[in-house]
Every structure is written in structure tokens, then in C-alpha cells.
Image: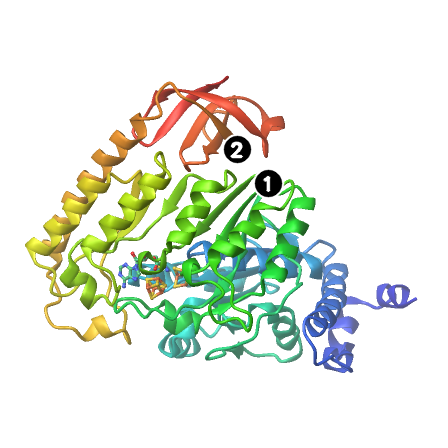
Amino acid sequence: MEKVSEKQMTTDVIEEQTDYAAWDTHPPDAEPQRQFYYMELCRRWLKEQQDRLGRPLTAAVITFGCQMNARDSEKLRGILENIGYEMSDTEAADFVIYNTCTVRENANLRVYGRLGRMKHEKEKNPDKRIALCGCMMQESEVVEKLKKSYRFVDIIFGTHNIFKMAELIFRRICEDHMVIDIWKDTDMIVEDLPNDRKYSFKTGINIMFGCNNFCSYCIVPYVRGRERSRQPDDIIREIEQAVSDGVVEVMLLGQNVNSYGKTLAEPISFAQLLRRICRIEGLLRIRFMTSHPKDLSDELIQVMAEEPKICRHLHLPLQSGSSEILKRMNRRYTKKDYLELVDKLRKACPDISLTTDIIVGFPGETEEDFLETMDVVERVGYDSAYTFIYSKRTGTPAAVMDDQIPESVVKDRFDRLLKKVQEKAAAACERFEGRTEMVLVEEINSQDPHLVTGRLSHNLVVHFPGDASLIGHLVPVKLTECHNFYYMGERA
Ligand code: SAH
Ligand code: SF4
Ligand code: F3S
């Protein structure tokens, strides 16, 4: 009935007459019911807009950050789809959400660059809406700057309340100005909201949020809040649901998965959680990140050695090879501890692939300190490593340390490190030559449509002849040609 009367109105009448705020009569207090209520109101509003324009409205979530950020984007997409937006991945969409990162300065600069171009887009499309969320929004200077110089932004929210996006969209519909909602911290974990997986066969699963480690260079604990673990039963239920939807590989996500469960009312270790997840029928592969070396237990190494579903890959951030720098980074392990850990891992899982993160140019880093890092790279022989130039983050202890390193020195060290990392990675990659390994096919190769691209349990990428019917399947592939960090192969 309502639909008929809506259609009879002219465009102008709809715009003048709909008092959207009057729709908001009985919002439930409890979550997630409250959000489903707002999704319904947004859905009604969206329908009106689409009828007025005679076309669907599109939305895009643009992700700038880490895997945790990418997982949040899937949740945002789930909410937007539920509201009825047609999903797109370009900034030409009617509603663009930037899910930001602030771990290094250049992550912030990228956001401002993209945002600058949006002002013009918004002038061209009066129905365009822009939201900003994620880690960068947890910094008050950023929000001040947006309020001052980017008035055209519609909605700003942070990392703790992404579950609340529908409610904020509805507020923006009712109030004709920028809506800002940032929480300083939270102990809330809202379960059972919709989410839209980027791949049908693999997904990230948050097992914990926040971080308590306060590495002295890192902004994450300030923008993601204190460490909170999800209940094991909630995690298992989510994975079981994903598996029944066709997922075969999960990536368990947390800033420090090795401290999972310590703060729960009924504590459980990460290793115990893994054992439970391994029992889920239909799930074929389990990955996790990130592992902090200081908390990597013998129990975990044993589970990794015993459970074939756990992938033969561990991302173990080193940050620096110098014990002195590690101390000033507040990492709470030494070079020796790290190398011993690697030895233990390699004894238990001989063929495991190891990857890492390294920061170059931390305040006070001497040439000798840097050579210690080079030494660890030499000895461990990582399968790959993300190398970062130290970026000063205001509010962190390292930002006010003496001896910030001149750019030219850092650049020189960075280049030397990168060269070594690439040499060692190419050597590590060679060990697979001629082997036949199970590959999870992920997609059609972006350059050659006759090839598909997939990954080994070791996380190594391989391209081989195949078609779309293989996507999401595990197939045996012979690794024939090593190309330094990936393989060409053929079905075995
Ligand atoms: N929780 C993860 C890392 C999350 S941030 C861990 O503890 O390993 C991802 C990576 O960004 C870090 O491992 C670190 O190498 C890098 N990083 C963090 N802060 C940085 C900074 N201020 N400058 C340069 N790199 C940084
Ligand atoms: Fe940052 Fe350290 Fe926490 Fe990782 S463990 S998120 S590097 S503070
Ligand atoms: Fe960036 Fe936030 Fe991840 S700062 S690295 S998106 S936790």
C-alpha cells in the first residue's frame, strides 16, 4: 500500500514531505537488533531515493589498511548490501566509504589525496555521500582537520563503532550536516551482523581486537584500543557458518594472536583455540596473523607441527635484529630469543615458510644495529619480508626519542636491506622447484585469462593453466618454473 502512494507523489513532494526523523520511533537498545532496525529505516529511505532517481544507488568501501581493516570493510559492505545499495569498487559510486589506516604517515597522505578529488565529484553528483572511518579517525587532529578543511564529508566514525554504520547513515539522512561519532575505546563486541566476503572460499575471522603491547613506534594500540578476545564459541560458530557457505580457508586475525584468550573469564590459549578450529569439518586450511615473537609458545609450535590443516607459513615480525633497538622498541625479546624461536619452529616444522616485518631507521639505529638486522635476514632466509622506513607517529614514545635518523642514511640502509631480502627470498623460493604441492585456486590470472592463480599452504603464489571452475578448489600442481617470488606450474 505504502509503495503505491509513494509512487503517486512527484519528486518534489517526496523531497519536501518526508520527515525521516519521524520514522525513528522505537529503536531497540540491544545490539545487534538496534542496527537491524536502522538498516530497515535506511532501506526505506534508499528505496525512496531510487524511485526518485529511477536508478539503483551504488556504494563502495575503499580499504587502506591491514587485513584487520580489510575484514572491517567486509562488515561494512555487508551492512550496505543489507540496506540495498548496489556494491561497486570504484569511487564513482554514490556512497563512498574510506576505511583508513594511520600506521605510517604515507597511509594518511594517501587518504587526503583521494579525498581532495572527491569534493569535485560531490559537486557533480548531488546524491553523492562520503564517509570516513577506521584507524585514522581515532586521532583527534585528523578529525579537526576534516571538520575545518573537508566540510563536504558526510559521516565520520572510528574503529570501535563500525557495527553502527546503519544508525549513523540514518542520522545523516535526518540531520543535514556532518555526523561524527568516535569512541575512545570500547569493551563491546557486537556479534551476528551481516558481512560480505570478498572471496567465497576464504575469509578473515577476527579472534581478537585491539592491542596491549605498546611497541614504542606503533600507533595501533592508541587507535584500536585495549586487547579484547572474542568468545571461542562465537568464533567457532562464525567459522562453521562460513564453511557451510563454501569457505575452505580462514585467516584468524588479531594484532597479537598469541595472547588470545588471556583476558576471557574462562581463559583459553591460542593453541587450544586452534585445536578446536582444526576439528571443523569441511575447513581445509587455517592461517593466522600476527604472531608476536614474545608470546609464541611451545604449545603453539606443537599444535602447528601436529595439525595438517594449519598452513606451513608463519608471519613472525622481527622489526629489528639489534637487541638494543628491540629494547627501545619495547618488543620484549632479543636477537638471540628470536633466532632460538626460529630454530625451534624449523625443528618442529622443517619446511615452514617464514615471513616478517622490518623497520629501518628507528631513532638511534646505528650502522652496527642495522648490520644486526641484516644478519638475522641472512640467517633466517625469509620467504618474504615487508620492509618499512620508520615513520614518526605523534603520541607514541618513539616520536620524542633523540637521534631521529637522517633520511639519506635511512634510504641507503633500506636499499641494502631490500636487496638482501630479495636475494634470500629468491633462494627460499627455489627450494620448491619440481615439487608437486596442493594449491588453493583463488582467481583467474589478471594478465592471462588462460591461467589461474593460487597459493600453496606455504603462501607461495603459483600461476598455471586452468579456468574459473577451479576457483575455490584445492588442486595438485607441479611447480615447474621459479620466478624469484612466484612459480609457473602445471596441473599434476
Ligand atoms: N601487530 C603486528 C603489526 C601491525 S602493524 C605486529 O606486532 O607485528 C604492521 C607493521 O607495520 C609492523 O609490523 C611494523 O613493521 C610496521 N609499523 C608499525 N608502526 C610503524 C611505524 N611507526 N613506522 C614504520 N613501520 C611501522
Ligand atoms: Fe603495534 Fe606492537 Fe601492537 Fe603490533 S604488537 S600492533 S607492532 S603495538
Ligand atoms: Fe593500519 Fe589500523 Fe591496520 S592503523 S595497519 S589499519 S590496525
Residue 418 is at least partly visible in this image: no
- Left or right: 192 in relation to 478: right
Q: Which residue sits at x=48%, y=32%?
A: 454
- Left or right: 219 in relation to 126: left
Q: Residue 432, located in which quarter of the rendered image? A: top left
Residue extending farthest to the right is: 1
Q: CA distance from mark 2 to mark 1?
A: 9 Å
Q: Position of residue 316 (x, y in %)?
A: 33, 50
Residue 395 is at least partly visible in this image: yes
Q: Check disc 2 and give the amino acid type.
A: Leu
Q: Secondary structure at mark 2?
A: strand
Q: Which residue sits at x=28%, y=50%?
A: 341
Q: Check disc 1 and give the amino acid type.
A: Val
Q: Is residue 241 above or below residue 232?
A: above
**Disc 1 residue crowd, few under 14, some 14–19, many 20+, Cα 10 Å:** many
Q: Is residue 161 above or below residue 300?
A: below
Residue 219 numbered mark, or none = none
**Which residue is labeled 1 in the image?**
248
Residue 440 numbered mark, or none = 2
Count all numbered tags in the image, as a single digit: 2
Q: Position of residue 56 (x, y in %)?
A: 70, 54
Q: Residue 38, located in which quarter of the rendered image? A: bottom right
> Which tag, 2 or 1, sits closer to the chain's start?
1
**Disc 2 residue crowd, few under 14, some 14–19, many 20+, Cα 10 Å:** many
> Which quadrant contains ligand 2?
bottom left
Q: Quick one: 256 or 400, which is closer to the camera?
A: 256
Q: Are marks 2 and 1 in contact (CB under 8 Å)?
A: yes
Q: Which residue sits at x=30%, y=66%?
A: 218
Q: How is the image coloured?
A: rainbow
Q: Is residue 185 above or below residue 108?
A: below
